[in-house]
Image (spheres, rainbow, N blue to C red):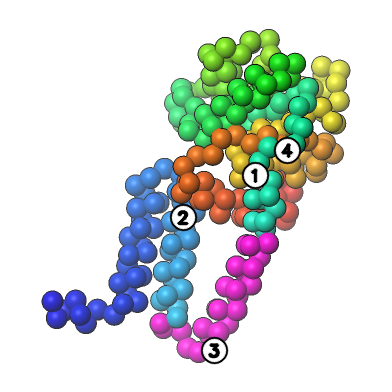
Amino acid sequence: MSFFKKIPGWSVITVLLLAFALFFKFALRGYSYIAYTLTFFAALIVAHRFFGKVLWRITFILVCIGLIYFIIVEIPIIKNARTDSNPQRDYLVVLGAAVHGDHPSPALVHRLDGAYEYLEKYPDSVAIVSGGKGKGENKSEAQAMFEYLTGRGISSERIIMEDRATSTKENLLYSYEIITDRGDSPQDSVAILSSPYHLFRAKCMSNSIGVEAAGVAGHFDNPILTLNYFIREAFGITHFWVFGW
């Protein structure tokens, strides 16, 4: 017992943070940014303990600047994490997500459930399900989405597959090509359906292409996983602002 009394509190907290970080990173699927955040806080505790006053003050200022930027970026992400008012459009572009073997991942199922509700509510709308075949996927995301929606009773005539895209920007570009090839204009005729945390970036990308689209939010996942993706989106939208994709 005397041994444990000698262990400083900061080291216990650091070890616990790192243990939880390892758990989220390696024991669960899709929680990487929660793990990175916990690791970052553990590193701050160590820095506060061992850095000199000047170096710690510099570190503290930089962290505060980064936190302020993060909050500013998260505001529009959170604000756009919902379905826009009056989202009815001729085309609903459903953005793909991972397929685990032959089956849609939970994130993709949440998007598809939102797409199903949209197509049921707006029977004149046509869905473009967009997503190619990635590593570890036995079929394209578009094919998996097509099968899921038709399996729930949506007519195959209302679903167009776009199975080349490997990124959000390609999802939009190739889907808009399909709309143009059908003799329609994407402008004012498209709603984009994605996960709530992803909608802001998807709409920004669409605007960069020259198409202003309505946003339709898929269903939320569990709260902790959703938090992970909201954290990730701050980095995703920053990457888009810097590199354009």
Q: Residue at x 55, y 84 (%)?
A: 57
Q: Residue at x 19, y 76 (%)?
A: 4
Q: Residue 11 got which mark? A: none
Circle 3 residues within 10 Å: few <14, some 14–19, many ≥20: few
Q: Is residue 162 visible?
A: no
Mark 4 nearby-residue class (10 Å; few <14, some 14–19, many ≥20): some
Q: Amino acid at mark 3?
A: Val
Q: CA distance from mark 2 to mark 4?
A: 28 Å
Looking at the rendered structure, the secondary structure element under dot 2 is: helix
Q: Which mark lies nearer to you, 1 or 3?
A: 1
Marks 2, 4: nearer the viewer = 4
Which residue lies under the disc numbered 2? Answer: 34
Residue 169 versus residue 11 in the image, above or below = above
Q: Nearer the viewer, mark 4 or mark 3?
A: 4
In primary-sequence order, the first of circles 2 and 4 is 2
CA distance for labels 4 and 1: 9 Å
Give the number of the disc on residue 81.
1
Q: CA distance from mark 1 to mark 2?
A: 19 Å
Callout 2 touching callout 4 (CB < 8 Å) = no
Residues drawn in magenta:
49-72
Using the image, determine if residue 193 lies above or below residue 140: below
Find numbered disc 4 in the image and state the secondary structure of the residue it sits on.
loop
| Residue at (44% x, 71% y) in the render | 43
Callout 1: 10 Å neighbours few (<14), some, many (20+)?
Answer: many
* Amino acid type, residue under disc 4 in the picture: Asp
